[in-house]
Image: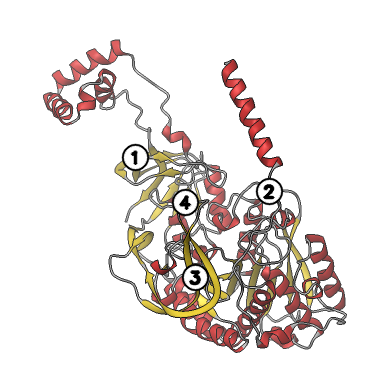
Amino acid sequence: MIARLLLSAGLLLAAAAAAAQRMEVEAPLPPAPAWRGASERLIAPRDHAWITPAEASGFQTTPSYNETRAYIERLVAASPLLRIEPFGRSSEGRELYAVIASRNDGRLRPRVLVQAGIHGGEIDGKDAGLMLLRDITQRGRARLIDNVDLVFVPIFNVDGHERSSPFNRPNQRGPRSQGWRTTARNINLNRDYLKADAPEMQAMIGLIRRIDPVLYFDIHVTDGVDYQYDITYGFQGREGRYAQSPAIGRWLDTVLRANMDRALSRAGHIPSGLIFAIDDRDPAAGIIDFAAQPRLSHAYGDFARVPTVLVENHSLKPYRQRVLGTYVLMEEALRLAATETASLRQAIASDRAARPGEVILGWRPSEQPGPTIPWRGIAYETSQSAISSRQEVRWLGRPQNSTMRVLVQEPSLTVALPRAWWVPASRPEVIERLRLHGVQFETMTAPRTVTLEMARLVNPQLQPASEGHVPMRVESVRREQRAESFPAGSIRVPADQPLALVAAALLEPLSPDSLLAWGFFPDILQRTEYIEGYAVEPLAQRMMETNPTLGREFQAAVAADPELAGDADRRLQWFYERSAYYDDRYLLYPVGRELN
């Protein structure tokens, strides 16, 4: 015991010594190619009365939470076109708010929701949005909201935003001090859309449901490899792949993508789809176009029938260039929502009216070769590092055009939807998540017994802690028909509804993002009754006498499994599991499926 205490004390002293020796040395970034573009005309003159804080600093810095709010309140006080709408509070108590830019003339217009700072250090959208609000109200661009409302959230992860430091994002070029990726509770909000643990996410989902945007933009900054593209963005349905909402996916892939790329290119930017390298240390290996799970914003929007675009500005481009490109993107989003309202609303209505019989919940790399695309890359070289003792990539800042292989995915898990799911009243946290997302259900006012398909987990595996949970990997279940009793307060979730795919992602036991996978049901892994050897051994004898087939099955199992053969406890357990004494709810997932 004393030795363990001394070891622990030594480890703590070593950690403290290491912390004391941390050097505040800025990470050298690769050179950035020179850039000029027409969007530079958007920057206000230095002496302009409404210059934004970022513009005033030459895009070297970004304003704090309080400074951002002060600037917005000045704009609101000066213009009837703007108002502030609080929609929640963060874990540390900061107010979450949106700025509404609207004509406020009583007309019901389509709404575009633009969200900045879901990761507190990736804040390009905030400073672009401040410039756009300024120009709408003070520089003659009010026409942008003639036929559309802008709902702008300048800082989503407000607590992470205020944990600011020059040493938070070593791979990102500007601003000088950047916020933190996760919330005060260390939750990554762009992994929280479906499970919705964070108060910030619960508030955002409430806002989305309330305003029902025709377009939803979630603005980030990348990590990863270097390339010439500065504004990359994506959605489920690009090139016809992965969309669960096919009509929305087609609209985004045709109408939005063509117009957005054109607007960004005209302004001097280089747009692209989302770029994720297969191997950051081997850029030539290709990039992957993957199907995201609904824990992420754009996949959640796909499941929820909300046209959603994930924007990833390139971290190695200067902050000034990234902010200006984001302004162009936001401006074009407003224009498209206003001019293409009919086709966009038709796509949304089509997907919300659809009642698919199945849902794809898992993906894997395709066995078929993906496309090869033109690639606007950056030259690089590799060299042996004496520190890492391996080859390291060094980016040279020089444009280099070539081609790139794209790895695509194919479905690995397709689930037929039931008529309904049943959730017992003993799972209020599950029922509350469904209610939060707007999933329709009926609540039982009296006890019910229903014959359902239930799932018993086969060899579930707990995973390392993640996002405030201990996730569970469930790769296989055994389906059982059972008469299940549900007390009053239990709910029936019909699949005949617009949000059936959200319900399926939350409730299907094999869904990678289900509440089961996130660890909401740890109790089903626990057994609470046992049997002693003096009881189970004679019980086993009696069971074999009563059912000779069982004895033959036991002998076959022993012959096939040497570990079973050599383990006395497991041999007795084999019979216990087949007796009426065994807990028949052990590993039984308590959410049932009502079949057609």
Q: Residues within 10 Å of mark 1 (few under 14, many from 20)?
A: few
Question: Left or right: where does residue 329 sit relative to residue 69?
Answer: left
Residue, disc 1: 483
Q: Which mark is residue 184?
A: 2
Closer to us: mark 3 or mark 1? 3
Closer to us: mark 2 or mark 1? 2
Instruction: Work out how far the residue at label 3 is from the one at label 4, CA to CA, in angstroms.
Output: 19 Å
Task: Name the residue: 54% across, 55% down.
Answer: 191
82 or 94: which is nearer to us? 94
The reply to whether dot 2 and dot 1 touch (C-beta < 8 Å) is no
Closer to us: mark 3 or mark 4? 4
Instruction: Work out how far the residue at label 1 is from the one at label 4, CA to CA, in angstroms.
Output: 62 Å
Give the residue type that dot 4 points to.
Answer: Ser
Question: Left or right: where does residue 417 sit relative to residue 253?
Answer: left
Residue, disc 4: 389
Task: Name the residue: 51% across, 57% down.
Answer: 295
Q: Residues within 10 Å of mark 4 (few under 14, many from 20)?
A: few
Mark nearer the N terminus (1 vs 4) = 4
Instruction: Work out how far the residue at label 4 is from the one at label 2, CA to CA, in angstroms.
Output: 37 Å
Q: Residues within 10 Å of mark 3 (few under 14, many from 20)?
A: some
Identify the element where label 3 is drawn.
strand
Count of numbered labels shown in the rendering: 4
Q: Is residue 292 above or below residue 18?
A: below
Give the residue type that dot 3 points to.
Answer: Tyr
